[in-house]
Image: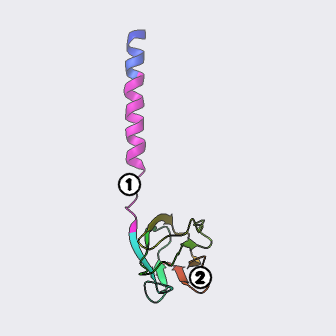
Amino acid sequence: MKRLALPLAAVLLVAGVALALALRGRAPAEPRTVRMSMSEYAFNGTNPTLRFKPGERIHFIVTNDESTNVLHNFRIVGLNVECGPPMKPGETREVTVTMPKSGEFAYTCCTHPGMGGTMVVAKK
């Protein structure tokens, strides 16, 4: 009887883990990629308003596309994305965030006041 207890416990453990994984639902979706170009003291030419859904995972790829030696950086106020080191022309920074339930958040270049825009998180 004792010889069967350990294998039986192992089978039950594996079955329990498989059931828990199945009940978790499907895996989270891959993050959506948003590319941001920094040049001429603007993001994507016009500092556009970006719109996202609550809970959406966003992978930002931010590139300093200046043709001269202008340094930039990238932060998102209120989403724990800090400035980080200055980016030289040609350098890229990648950041992935999960959007909160709702709100408006500023994305900015810390070294250039006025360079930045708004992120709106809403159901529609």
Dominant SS in magenta: helix
Q: Is residue 44 above or below residue 80?
A: below
Residue 5 on image: x %, y %? 42, 16
Identify the residue under disc 1.
27
In the picture provided, is 24 more to the left or to the right than 71?
A: left
Q: Is residue 88 above or below residue 11?
A: below
Q: CA distance from mark 1 to mark 2?
A: 39 Å
Question: In the image, what residue occupies the spot 47% across and 63% down?
Answer: 96
Mark nearest the camera among 1 and 2 is 2
What amino acid type is highlighted by mark number 2? Answer: His
What amino acid type is highlighted by mark number 1? Answer: Ala
Residue 119 on image: x %, y %? 53, 80
In the picture provided, is 67 more to the left or to the right than 108?
A: left
Residue 66 on image: x %, y %? 43, 80
Question: In the image, what residue occupies the spot 56% across and 77% down?
Answer: 109
- Report if residue 16 lies within the magenta region: yes
In the picture provided, is 119 more to the left or to the right than 1?
A: right
Towards the viewer: 28 or 104: 104
**Secondary element type, mark 2:** loop
Q: Quadrant of residue 102?
A: bottom right
- The residue furthest bottom is 46
Identify the residue under disc 2.
112
Towards the viewer: 93 or 31: 93
Q: Which residues are magenta?
A: 9-32
Question: In the image, what residue occupies the spot 42% across and 36% down?
Answer: 16
Question: In the image, what residue occupies the spot 49% across and 67% down?
Answer: 55
Task: Confirm whether residue 30 shows in the render.
Answer: yes
Q: Which mark is residue 109?
A: none
Task: Confirm whether residue 1 shows in the render.
Answer: no
Mark 1 touches mark 2? (CB < 8 Å): no
Residue 32 on image: x %, y %? 39, 69
